[in-house]
Amino acid sequence: MHSLKPETGTPKIFVVEDEPEIGRLICSSLEEYGFRCEHLATGRQLLARARQVAPDLCIVDLGLPDMDGMQVVRELQDGSPCAVLILTGRNDVTDRVLGLELGADDYIVKPFEPRELVARVRSILRRYQRAAPAEPAERSIASFASWRFDSNQHTLIAADGSETSLSSAEAGLLTALLRRPNKILSREQLLGERDVDPFDRSIDVRISRLRRKLDDDPQNPKLIKTVYGAGYLFSCQVSWE
């Protein structure tokens, strides 16, 4: 009997992988646990399909025949934002960090264990479920420093009225920080995971992206402070409406 089961609902997952056997392995592994999967062989096919049907998550191989996988991630986040898991045979930290910088949520390196793939997919989807828009009755707009944040729309609003869109993962992270200002939150608390791999840098990359969008100097941040060995602290008064 399987110990891993999908979250409520049936997430739709697109898999772009040009090696048919690996594509079938990924799909069969996920379908075994109840996920709906669709295999596509090229980046262009994935982007076209994502415009037709919004996926919950895309698994993107970086080594595609028609276009670079990084470009696929970039275009997905620009045109059809969704959760992204990078699949790569490149055991290169620079590639993985670049993928996270472009908006991917996690990565897995070939060869991989199917159960690890399922676990990572579930972890990403849990983060997105926690970042889902708040109920209408819940206070959903936060004001802090010179910013306003609409957690329903995942939008940052500057003092001049200009707006910046956040990914669901970024919005979920910012919401967690804003709900508990001036308190140290561990990486486990921010990711909602009990056991976080000490080498997992996804949270740090996401913090870096948020700092840039908040004009928070990464060398001397005023808003999101790093508490070494403990986690992160949002150092600002926050009011919700």
Image (cartoon, rainbow, N blue to C red):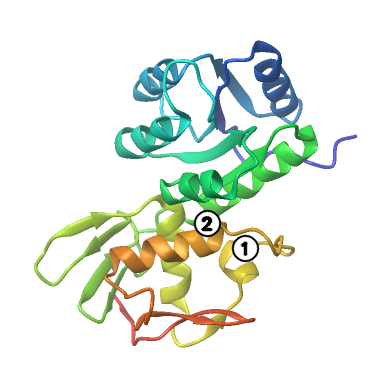
Residue 116 percent across, percent down from the top left: 76, 41
Nearest the camera: 127 or 18? 18
Above or below, 109 relative to 180: above
Above or below, 193 relative to 189: above
Nearest the camera: 231 or 97? 97
The residue drawn where x is 44% and y is 35% is 70
Residue 95 percent across, percent down from the top left: 52, 43
Are dots 1 and 2 in contact, CB under 8 Å?
yes
Packing grade of label 1 (10 A; few <14, some 14-19, many >=20) is some
Task: Give the left or right position of residue 135, taking residue 31 as reference.
Answer: left
Residue at numbered disc 1? 192
Q: Please name which of the two marks, 1 or 2, marks the residue nearer to the observer.
A: 1
What amino acid is labelled 2 in the image? Arg
Q: Quadrant of the N terminus?
A: top right
Q: SS class of the residue under badge 1?
A: loop
What amino acid is labelled 1 in the image? Gly
Task: Give the left or right position of residue 59, taking residue 172 as reference.
Answer: right
Q: Which mark is residue 130?
A: 2
Nearest the camera: 117 or 142? 117
Who comes first in sequence, dot 1 or dot 2? 2
Where is residue 114, by image quadrant?
A: top right
Task: Give the left or right position of residue 125, taking residue 68 as reference.
Answer: right
Q: SS class of the residue under badge 2?
A: helix
